[in-house]
Image (cartoon, rainbow, N blue to C red):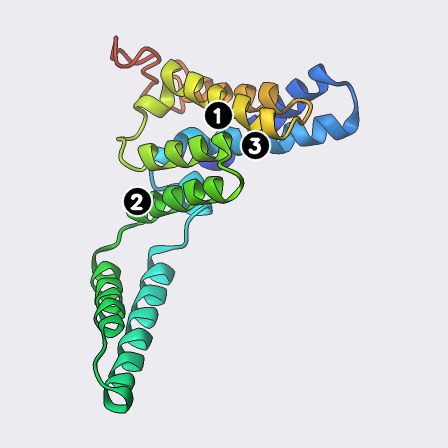
Amino acid sequence: MKGTSHLFIGTAVGAIAGYAVQPDIKTALIGAAVGGISGVVPDLDTNGLASNSITLSKKVSKWLMETAGIVILLTLIYQVFTEGLSQDIYVYGGIGLLLLIVSRIITQRRMLTITGILVMLLGFVLDQSLGILLAGSYIIIASFLPHRSYTHSILGIVFYAYILKHVYAQWPIDGLVAAGIAGYISHLLADMKVLPVNRRGVKWFMPLWNREF
């Protein structure tokens, strides 16, 4: 099933779940937003709507790295001629070269890994927010997983619920946890092989049982 379909389904079930927790329009709208996001989260394990929406495109990220690397190296060359050699020049020169090298080998999946690392750093900045740290770790892990594996399983649901629990502990928003879990589960249900639009199913019980349903 396409990412846009998961987004719409997650939005709908998230709104329902939020309204069930607190029957008012505000909570339903919050639930819709959380459910929509959660509805595409399992697909962070592939290049699609979820991963591409939270990372820069490969073309843009490559251009930024190349530009930054060239600017750093040109600046250092200028400093060598005007101020001479120093220890800092070697450090920044190494960073410039590293950016140029990485720009040649970076893939969209590794951009997702970098995004996860940045999210974890944000968690440290925000008073070591465990919810944000866990969200970053989820993104990093998903960037190395094959499609429809652990993110599409009960284990993935449990981990995501654990993230939501800690996010809610810091930002207690009505309907957050219920809408998030509902949106996430809706993705797995919509990916099941019983639906004619799906060629593959979901391995709910990984790693104990790898049968697709």
Give the x, y percent position of residue 86: 23, 77
**Residue sitting farthest toward the bottom:** 82
> Residue at 24% across / 83% down in the picture?
77
Residue 56 is tagged as none
In the rendered image, is residue 87 in sight? yes
Toward the viewer: 184 or 168? 168
Q: On screen, 31 above or below 113? A: above
Question: Going by the image, does 198 lie left or right of 101?
Answer: right
Q: Does 38 appear above or below 20?
A: below
First of labels 2, 3 by sequence position: 3
Choose mark 1 or mark 3, whichever is in front: 1
**Residue 178 location, quadrant:** top right
For image coordinates 26% across by 76% down, the residue present is 73
Which quadrant is the N terminus positioned in?
top left
Measure the C-alpha gap from mark 2 to mark 1.
22 Å
**Residue drawn at (53%, 34%), measured in percent from left and top?**
37
Q: Amino acid at mark 3?
A: Gly
